[in-house]
Each structure stands twice: as C-alpha cells, then as structure tokens.
Amino acid sequence: MTLGRKWLLTVVALASWPDSASSQVDALSRTPSRFASLEGVRVHYKSLGTGRTAVVLVHCWACDMHVWQEQVGALDGRVRALALDLPGHGRSDKPSRAYSMAFFAQAVNAVFESAGVDRAVLVGHSMGVPVVREFSRLFPGKILAIVAIDGWLVSPGLDSAAVERQVRLFEGPDLARSFEQMIAPMFPKPEQAGVRRQVTQTAQATPQHVVQAAFRGMMDPAIWRDDPLKVPALVVMAKGPNWPANYRARVLRLGADVRYEELEGVHHFLMLERPDLFNALLLEFLKSLGVMSG
C-alpha cells in the first residue's frame, strides 16, 4: 500500500477502532427506506443521521446500496450518510430507457433534494465514479469532495466496437453465468464465499436492459473529458494489472488536491474485502475536510 508517512500513521490508528460495521448491528438494514422521484422514476435511498451536509454513497454497475454495508456502520453517528440504489438497480424503478451517467447524476441530485441535503462528499465505486464525476459537472455547487474507488476518472479508451463486444457478453440466456464468471475472481478466498454470492446474486437480478444500457452509458465517449477536478479527491485503487501504467499520473494531473492510494492484496470490491483499511482512509479524508464529528 502506497501511503504517505502521516497517512500511514493515521490509518494504522483508525484501522484499530472497534466500531467497524461488521462489529455493530447492521446499520443499513435497520434504516427505513425512502424514495425520491426523477421524471416519474422512484429512486430508493436510506438516510442516517441529520444535517444538510452528508456523505453520499454511489454503487457500481449492476449492484445496489448493499456494497456499502461495511461503510455505513463506520459512518453512522459521525456524519450524515445517504446510500441509494441508482435507477434500474436494487429497489429503484427499472424502466426501459437510456441509462446515461447524466441521468444517474440527476437521480443522485433527486436524493439530495428529497433528503434535504445541500452539499456532500460523493463516494463512488466503479461505475459510481463516472456518475460522481458527472454530478460534479452538473451540480458543482453541491459537491464538497470526491472519493473514487477502483473506477475510471479519465477515459478508458474503448472504441464503440470494443464497447459492443463487452455488451454482447451480457445478452441472451447466459447473463447469469456471465456475471458469475466475472465476479468469482474478484473474491478468490474461501472465506469470501458469502459476499461473493451476495454480489453475484445482486448482479444477476439486475434486468438485462439495465445492464446493457448502463454499460453503454458508462462508456459513452462524450463523458470522458479530462476537465480539472475543482474539489478535493481521494482515489483508492486495487493495485494490480487491470489499470494502465500511466493511470496514476493521468489522475494526478486532474487537480492539485488529489490523493492517490493503492491497496495491495485486494480486488475490485476492496471496500468489502478490507473495510478496515478502506474505512480508515475514508474517515481520515472526511476528518481532513472537517465534515466528520467524533
């Protein structure tokens, strides 16, 4: 793990805190559901805590808010937290339509308005990263900072033919098997069988029209502009061969206040694999922004 000296000392201290989500009552499950509305589409979310400043958790492609089950408990009582199901996912409505990153960003804003939140730190995983990036462009006055987890902040460089080849992997009757084959290597350890099954079943339950449309939206060349980040950002990546050698340098060029961290021995769902390490990084970042109490 590549960490500066100050961050390393703080992370070690925070990782030893006893009140991680896995040692508490499941804060996400015991929190009542709420619904925002966007263009007649209901957007499911949950809200913990009070206040007009929040941390908003934006999940990945073909998943739902439960990928944050290990973070919600760590945030509960320290900062207001919102977790949502993007349209097409989880308990949100799933109409047949285009699922662009702008539409997802507008859904996040609908949750802001429903929950009475003015400004927030947006935390995105995988597809959630371009959603958060698009939100920062559409609603710049509402974003305090970005946390990007193992997702693209700059162009992945796929042409339209490559995108369509990927989409075809998730069409026809083999959708469930495709997800199983894709997700299994992300949770290689026997003790991860439960969470691997949970993530796989969530992805398999996502309607095929949403899976394909959201993938196309995520890879739309129009959203991949290397415009500067105007807010602080924490980027947390799984160290490995899945990212170009120059990815770190490209991300750091986006802004002067970008912190880039790599975790070793983890995979794409690093916040589920090593919540102790990830939560320590997240809490310290929130503390540095002055948005966390306790």
Image (spheres, rainbow, N blue to C red):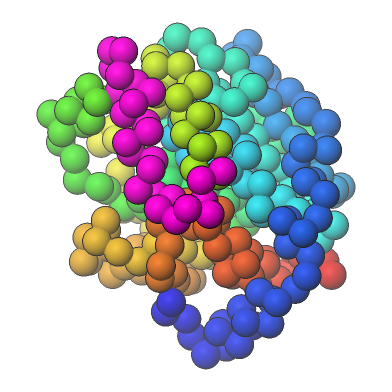
Residue at the limit of the structure toward the front, as seen here: 190
Residue 19 location in percent, x, y? 79, 65
Q: Is residue 212 left or right of residue 91?
A: left
Q: Position of residue 138 (x, y in %)?
A: 51, 38
The front one of 224 and 141 is 224
Q: Tell me which residue sits at (21%, 66%) in the image.
A: 245
Residue 89's image quarter?
Answer: top right
In this rendering, position of residue 273 left or right of residue 40: left
**Quadrant for the N terminus in the image:** bottom left
Q: How far from the left and from the top, in percent, is residue 164?
A: 19, 25
The reply to whether the magenta stretch includes residue 178 is yes
Label the magenta part by its dominant secondary structure.
helix
- Which stretch appears magenta? 170-194
For residue 256: magenta? no
Query: Measuring 46% from the left and 16% from the top, which residue is drawn there?
Result: 207
60 sits left or right of 276 in the view: left
Above or below 153: residue 221? above
| Rendered position, 272 above or below 208 | below
Q: Measuring 47% from the left and 29% from the top, which residue is drawn there?
A: 203
Task: Report whether 44 appears left or right of 223.
Answer: right
